[in-house]
């Protein structure tokens, strides 16, 4: 479990549920978050709600109570951790077409989805030699940690997953193997769609990790774990490890990739400007702009304030 003595409560949540008018939900939710000092990002769409927020215990509970009044959200599930300081700079509540963008028509996790597997049962499933284990996350996430034996789709966005899956399934079936597939992602939401997609593609035996990697790292002891590395999270903590303790990675503010201590030793690393992952993909004019942004961030830090463009 994460250290309950840390002052900031961090909650990752999602719910697939029909919202007839998500726009009507936006402003009251945003105002409550601002009043309670809660920061983070929440996405609203006709298919439901998704996001991560952080704040005081009382503030987070008031926001959760408000969300529970939304249609279909009375029993909303969430993953919880703690942070030593606020991991977000601001509060955003956005209206979107999808709460997790896959770009496929007629995907409805409420109608058709894979079989949920509790974290306590996950090791047995993925240790079965007949199980094909698939990571559904983006390349920069997989790079810092994944489950042993997992297939890396090597994708930059979740939109690329359907085409990759179709190709991989053909390869599997060409080998004469029956597709018994287990999928996982950070908090579970991408697997709601990826397993629903697999079912629509005709794969009957498809499973996914309930609560995602975050729930697994929260409840499975490190000595029993089949997870190697750290888990990328979409806030200023950058990554977490077993017990959801903050990890060892920082973020490159030029390309948003996680960077290790070894990356910082590279001649291509310059704080806020470049890292080994992006140096060759940026122009000198871009790096000049990043240096100016970094300079403004340093000035803000010296004043004891936050530079919101960073």
Image: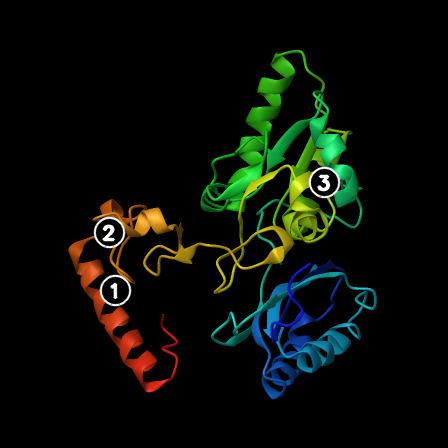
Residue depicted at x 74% and y 38%? 122
**Residue 194 visible, this angle:** no
**Residue 181 visible, this angle:** yes
Task: Name, please, the residue furthest toward the front.
Answer: 223
Residue depicted at x 61% and y 57%? 244
Name the residue that disc number 2 marks. 282
Lower sequence index among marks 3 and 1? 3
Of residues 136 and 10, the one drawn nearer to the viewer in this rendering: 10
Q: CA distance from mark 3 to mark 1?
A: 40 Å
Q: Quadrant of the C terminus?
A: bottom left
Name the residue that disc number 1 marks. 290
Name the residue that disc number 3 marks. 208
Lower sequence index among marks 1 and 2? 2
Lower sequence index among marks 2 and 3? 3
Q: CA distance from mark 1 to mark 2?
A: 10 Å
Task: Residue 21: name its quadrant.
Answer: bottom right
Q: Where does the image place residue 93, in percent across and percent down from the top left?
A: 58, 73
């Amino acid at each position: 479990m994460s250290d309950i003595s840390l002052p900031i409560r961090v909650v990752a949540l999602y719910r697939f549920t029909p919202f007839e008018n998500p726009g009507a939900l936006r402003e009251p939710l945003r105002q409550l978050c601002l009043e309670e000092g809660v920061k983070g990002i929440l996405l609203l769409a006709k298919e439901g709600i998704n996001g991560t927020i952080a704040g005081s215990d009382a503030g987070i509970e008031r926001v959760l109570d408000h969300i529970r009044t939304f249609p279909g959200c009375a029993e909303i599930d969430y993953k919880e951790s703690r942070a030593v300081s606020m991991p977000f700079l601001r509060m955003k509540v956005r209206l979107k077409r999808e709460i997790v963008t896959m770009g496929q028509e007629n995907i409805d996790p409420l109608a058709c989805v894979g079989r949920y597997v509790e974290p306590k049962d996950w090791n047995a499933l993925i240790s079965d030699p007949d199980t094909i284990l698939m990571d559904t996350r983006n390349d920069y996430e997989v790079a810092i940690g994944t489950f042993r034996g997992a297939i890396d789709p090597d994708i930059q966005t979740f939109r690329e997953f359907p085409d990759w899956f179709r190709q991989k399934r053909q390869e599997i079936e060409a080998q004469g193997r029956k597709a018994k597939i287990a999928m996982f992602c950070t908090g579970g939401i991408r697997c709601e769609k990826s397993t629903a997609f697999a079912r629509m593609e005709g794969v009957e035996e498809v499973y996914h990790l309930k609560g995602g990697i975050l729930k697994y790292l929260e409840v499975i002891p490190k000595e029993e774990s089949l997870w190697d590395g750290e888990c990328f999270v979409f806030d200023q903590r950058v990554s977490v490890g077993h017990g959801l303790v903050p990890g060892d990675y920082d973020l490159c503010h030029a390309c948003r990739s996680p960077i290790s201590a070894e990356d910082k030793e590279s001649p291509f690393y310059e704080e806020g400007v470049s890292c080994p992952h992006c140096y060759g993909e940026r122009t000198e004019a871009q790096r000049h702009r990043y240096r100016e942004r970094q300079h403004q961030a340093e000035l803000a830090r010296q004043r004891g304030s936050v530079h919101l463009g960073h």
